[in-house]
Image (spheres, grey):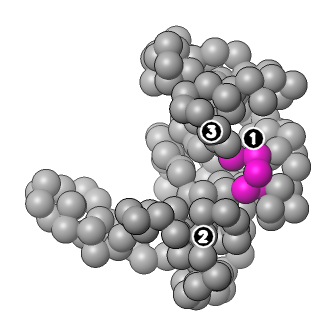
Amino acid sequence: NFSLLKKNVEANGYKNVVVEQKAVADQKGKIKLYLGNDERNTEHSIVRNRDTTEQYFEVDSVILDDYFKDKSVDFIKMDIEGAEHYAVLGMQKLLKGSKNVKMALEFTPPFLKGLGIAPEEHLHLLQGLGFTISNINEQNKILEDFEPERIPIYLRRGWEGSISTNIWCSKERSKISP
């Protein structure tokens, strides 16, 4: 996946992209990354689940508060197969210091539970950092108020058997469509 990312950056002539072969987390060190079992081999995760094999390799992890020390960020997109909670824990200073930061995150309750994190705990963390959370309704191409008690409804939208949805986190109420 990393070599494909590098080829994509080069093929598109991007000059403002830095590629790193690291995981983002709430602590520095090594993390087990379980290999995905789909034919595209894209669903690697630190969560051992139905989409991964028993095979893993260890990757270095970084804390984004350290990586982006003394910098602000405007936009963050994360789809890291359940590790979003740990990534957010490791970037709390960055998020507090970036006044207009917005985030698009995958929200996958079964993966969070696999890490021992209640989905509501993840949402409370985001809200505690000053974010208003909206569900990205991909079917209707709108942002809608996110109500934690409706999590099962959000997860059924999209494709059959979905276990995730995407959420929009903003420190100001946004009227834009995803």
Question: Does residue 21 sit above or below 133 in this rendering?
Answer: below
- The residue range painted magenta reads 108-112
Secondary structure beneath disc 1? helix
Crowd around label 3: few <14 · some 14–19 · many ≥20 (10 Å): few
Quadrant hosting residue 148: top right
> Residue at point 54% right, 32% down?
159
Residue drawn at (63%, 15%), measured in percent from left and top?
Answer: 144
Q: Quadrant of residue 3?
A: bottom left
**Disc 3 vs disc 1: Cβ atoms closer than 8 Å?**
no
**Viewer can see residue 85:** yes
133 or 36, nearer to the observer: 36
Q: Residue 41's mark?
A: none
Question: Can residue 68 be seen in this snapshot?
Answer: no
Give the amino acid at mark 1.
Leu
Tell me the amino acid under the disc marked 2.
Thr
N-terminal label among 1 and 2: 2
Residue identified by numbered label 1: 126
Image spot of residue 121 (x, y percent): 87, 46
From what the image shows, is residue 130 above or below residue 46? Answer: above
Local packing at callout 1 (Cα closer than 10 Å; few below 14, some 14-19, many 20+) is: many
Using the numbered discs, state the Cα–Cα distance from disc 1 to disc 2 in whole angstroms.
27 Å
Assess whether residue 109 is covered by the magenta stretch: yes
Give the label, 1 or 2, closer to the camera. Answer: 2
Specify which label sits upstream in the sequence, 3 or 1. 1
Residue 110, given in percent of the width and then of the height, sits at 76, 51
Indicate the position of residue 35 as horizontal and vertical percent values: 53, 75
Looking at this view, is 3 or 34 the one in front?
34
The three-letter code of the residue at mark 3 reads Ser
Q: Nearer the viewer, mark 3 or mark 1?
A: 3
Q: Using the numbered discs, state the Cα–Cα distance from disc 3 to disc 1 in whole angstroms.
A: 22 Å
User: On the image, numbered disc 3 is attached to which residue?
Assistant: 162
